[in-house]
Amino acid sequence: MDPSTLDRVTGEVVAAMDAYDLQQAVPPLVQFIDDLTNWYIRRSRRRFWKSEDDADKTRAYETLHTVLLRLCQIAAPFVPFLSDEIYRNLRTGGMPASVHLCDYPLPGGLPRDESLEAQMATVQKVVGLARQLRADFNLKVRQPLAALHVVCRDNAVLELVRPLADIVADELNVKEVRFGRDESALAELSAKANYKTLGPRLGGRMKMAVARIAAFGPEPIARVLDGQPVDIELDGHPVTLAPDDVLVQRTPKAGLAVASSGPLVVALETDLSPALVQEGHARELINRIQNLRKTRDLDVADRITLSIRAGDELLAAIEAHRDAIAAETLAAELIASAGGGDIDINGHACSIDLQAVPGR
């Protein structure tokens, strides 16, 4: 979450307030807070928590400090007490004692980078589409997938996402992000008449138009996807179809889950190899162990001894990802043995016990 976005939000809120339209002033703030907490702060946790005080950690804190101070000032008229409480905890020497003694911020006070904003908005759109696919197809977020395909006929859109492919892969828990411009590799494309736009225009000829559009091959469908008109003939008379007159339907190919928004298409590979299944088990175990740490009131820095009793499949996953499990859960010792229990890990029963390491 960069200061550039906050400067844009400042302008939107100020413009709405100047127009005495408070209903329009609040939504940009709400959206920004959601992006700040569920994108920047969540994605920066490792930067905040790492032990070494390097330049990257400093920049992460400085950015968050700048953004929170400005956010308090913008939000002060809407949530006066909360804004002032946060501001007082963030203010530095020489700053007013209360947020309500500050000048109300105006756009232009922070550096603006519209190209960066557009890039991050596109990346978040890709991530949002793929997350919805995971939910729709019941693909657990902690289960790694082989690949995400990002396809768009406009190469400029792909070039916005390509430099940040590692962020997309991390957000979606996929091993690889692949880019392309031909969505027919992902789904079978077919055309359907848009009754809403064509019905009033064509009247009795609508039935013929439905049949003609349903018979569209790759070339007319490609024209529609490119936003170009398509000419057909009905009863010996030419008719020009606008792109909105034709609905392009996508039937995903085997092993793929596909979603689209405008010209942007994303597809998740849903087939799971044994290695991916094992990693999914390991990630689910890590999550359960971390939750157990919380219930035991352990400090985030406390090291533990960890004992897991499970069946053969889970034991194989533990051995394959022993180092990752130990590192993520701060396990100084990890003992895995045959057995079972009342904890369900992707359909496999196990038991987990952990103890804090004394004196550490």
Image (cartoon, helix red, strand yellow):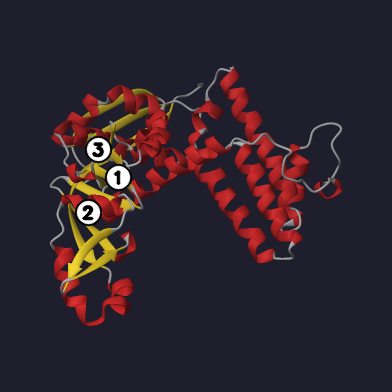
Q: Which residue is mark 3?
A: 145
Q: Residue at x 67, y 41 (%)?
A: 68
The quarter of the displayed image where residue 209 is located: bottom left
- First reached walking from the N terminus: tag 1 or tag 3: 3
Q: Residue at x 33, y 25 (%)?
A: 324
- First reached walking from the N terminus: tag 2 or tag 1: 2
Identify the mark at residue 266; answer none if there is no mark. 1
Residue 327 vertical position relative to residue 296 in the rendered view, above or below: above
Looking at the image, is mark 2 or mark 1 nearer the viewer? 2
What is the spatial separation of the Cα atoms under label 3 and label 2, in whole angstroms? Answer: 30 Å
Q: Residue at x 28, y 69 (%)?
A: 194
- The amino acid type of the residue labelled 3 equals Leu
Camera sees residue 144: no
Identify the mark at residue 221; answer none if there is no mark. 2
Q: Secondary structure at mark 1?
A: strand
Looking at the image, is mark 3 or mark 2 nearer the viewer? 2
Question: Residue 91: x and y, percent?
Answer: 78, 37
Question: Residue 113: x and y, percent?
Answer: 60, 35
Q: Secondary structure at mark 2?
A: helix
- The amino acid type of the residue labelled 1 equals Val
Residue 235 vertical position relative to residue 130 in the rendered view, above or below: below
What is the spatial separation of the Cα atoms under label 1 and label 3, in whole angstroms? Answer: 14 Å
Q: Residue at x 17, y 29 (%)?
A: 316
What is the spatial separation of the Cα atoms under label 2 and label 1, in whole angstroms? Answer: 18 Å
- The amino acid type of the residue labelled 2 equals Ile
- First reached walking from the N terminus: tag 3 or tag 2: 3
Q: Secondary structure at mark 3?
A: loop
User: Left or right: 162 with respect to 114?
Assistant: left
Q: Are marks 3 and 2 in contact (CB under 8 Å)?
A: no
